[in-house]
Amino acid sequence: MSPTSVEVLIVGAGVSGIGAAIELLRRGRRDLLVLEGAQGLGGTWRDNTYPGIEVDIPVSSYCYRFEMGFPWSRLYAPGHEVLAYLRHCATKYGVDPYVRYGCRVRSAAFDEGTNRWSVELADGRRFESRFLIAATGLFSTPRVPPFPGLERFEGTTLHTARWDHAVSLAGKRVGVVGTGASAVQVVPHVAREASALTVFQRTPIWISPRFNPALRRAAPSARPTRRQRLRRWVSELALELLTYAVVHYGRMRLWLGGFQRVVRAWMRRQVRDPAVARKLLPDYDLGCKRPTSSSDYLATFNLEHVTLETSPIRELVPEGVAVEGGAVHALDVLVFATGFQTTEQGNQPSFQVRGRGGVELHDFWERNRFQSYAGIAVRGFPNLFLTHGPYSGGFNWFAMLETHLGQILGCLEHAWATDRRRVEVNAEAYRRYVAATAELAERTVFKAGHCASARSYYVDRHGDASLPSPRTPFQRDRWAKARGVADFDFA
C-alpha cells in the first residue's frame, strides 16, 4: 500500500500541534494532517485529570493570542476547562477534519533524493510529507522511580499523569511520592479523603501564595474584553520580570535574594510545627526548579492525619514503603506525583528521527549535547521543525509556542513563495546561535546560582540546563521577528 502523502505532517494534537494546524489553516493551507497516537486531542490536558489539576500561571496568558475570549471560571483555570478550550479552538478553526487518531508515530526518515519525510506508524502504516512538525510536547511519558520492590507492593498504585478515578481514597492510608507541581495540587485533595496521608519528600519546592479569584463568565467571544486584555498584559509582564531574574541572575541576585526571603517567611508562617516548616523550606535558589503557588498545600501539613517523610525511600514492601533508617509506612494506595521523562533519550520528540546521512536525532544529541537553533531546528535535519527544542522553554508554553510558530510558518511560506523544496538552518548561523546560547546559559541561575540540591528536571544527563531558554519571552520573540528566515538556506 502506498503511503498517504501531504505537504505538512504535524505529530501530536496537544497545545502545540493544534496551534500549528490552526496557523496553517488561517493562512489558507489545507494540505496537512495531524497524527495523534491517542483517541482524542488535548495532550497533557487530556491525560492529566488528577484531583486539583489547574494551570500554574494565570490563564489570561495560558491561551492562544488569537483566541483570548474564552469564558474561564477562575484566574487559575481547572484542567478540564483547558481541555474544553483546546477542543473549542480545534472546532472553531476547523482542525478536527485534519486529525487522525490512533496514529502513534514510530519513526521518521528524510529522503535526500526527494526532499521528503517518510513517516512510519507503530502499526506499520506509512505517511510522507515535504515538511514535518514534531509537536509531541514535553510532558507525555510519566516517570516512575525504579524503587526496589515496586512489584511486591500489595496496595494500589496511581500516577498523577494517569489517574484512575475508579479508585476511591476515602478512608484509605495513602502515600504521595514527590513534592513538585502536581503534588502541590493533588496533596490537599487527597488529604480531604484519606484517613492517613504520608508525603514522601526528596526536595522541597518554592511555593508562593495563590490568588485565584472567580472570573466573570460569558459566552465565548471572538474579541477579548478590555478586562481580559489587561489581565494578559499584567500576567505577561510578571512572567517577563520573573524570567529576567532567572536568566540574568548576576544582575538580579540581590533582588532575587530579597524576594526569596519574603517567600520563605510566608512559607514558614503557614506551618505550625517549626520542625516540619524547616523541612518544607528549599535550600536552593528560586528558579532552579519551576516554582509554583498554592494557598492550601503547606497548610495541609497542619492536619493531624498528614505526615511529612523526608528520609529517602529504601524500597517498597508488600505492606507499604520502607525508608532509610528502618521505618515502614503501611499504605493502601501509593500515588506517584513524580512528573515526566523530559530529556531522556528517545523522549523529545517521542519517535526516532533520521536526517541527512541517516543520522538519528537522539544519537546526535547524545554525542553533541542538546542543541537547536531557536528551539525550532537542528542542522542536518532539513524540513523538520520542532515546537519545543532544546534551550527554548519558559514559564509560559503558549508564549514560547507563538514565537516558534511565527518563525516556522515564516520558513514554510518563504519556501512555498519561492518554490523551494528544502529548508535547513544555515551552518554558520547554527554554530553562532548554539555558541551564543551556551554563553548566555552560563549567566542563568542554573549555572551561576545555588542549584546543586534542586534535582531539577531542567538539568539533563550532561549537567546542562537544556530545557529553559536563557532569554526572556520578549527577548526571544523580538529576536525571532528580527531574524525571520535570514538564517535558513532554501533549495
Image (cartoon, rainbow, N blue to C red):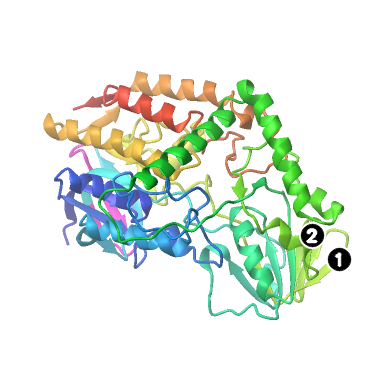
Name which residue lies at 61% across and 63% down: 186
Residue 308 on image: x %, y %: 78, 60
Q: Is residue 117 visible?
A: no
Tell me where the magenta segment starts and ends, as one range: 112-127
The residue mark sitting in front, 1 or 2, is 2
Estimate how packed mark 1 is, as few (under 14), some (14 to 19) or many (20 or more) residues with alpha carbons within 10 Å.
few
* Residue 329 falls within the magenta-colored stretch: no
| Disc 1 element | loop
* Residue at mark 2: 309
Looking at the image, which is closer to me, 202 or 52?
Answer: 52
* Residue at mark 1: 327
Of the residues shown, which amino acid type is indicated by label 2?
Glu
Q: Is residue 234 visible?
A: yes
* Residue 124 falls within the magenta-colored stretch: yes
Marks 1,2: beta carbons within 8 A? yes
Estimate how packed mark 2 is, as few (under 14), some (14 to 19) or many (20 or more) residues with alpha carbons within 10 Å.
some
Residue 6 on image: x %, y %: 17, 50
Name which residue lies at 36% across and 63% down: 84
Of the residues shown, which amino acid type is indicated by label 1?
Ala
Looking at the image, which is closer to me, 168 or 89?
Answer: 89
Name which residue lies at 59% across and 23% down: 443
280 relative to 429 in the view: left or right: right
Q: Quadrant of the N terminus?
A: bottom left
Residue 33 on image: x %, y %: 22, 54
Name the disc covering residue 362, or none: none
370 relative to 461 in the view: left or right: left
Question: Which quadrant holds residue 92?
Answer: bottom left
Q: How far apart are marks 1 and 2 (CA)?
A: 10 Å
Q: In which quarter of the image is the C terminus?
A: top left
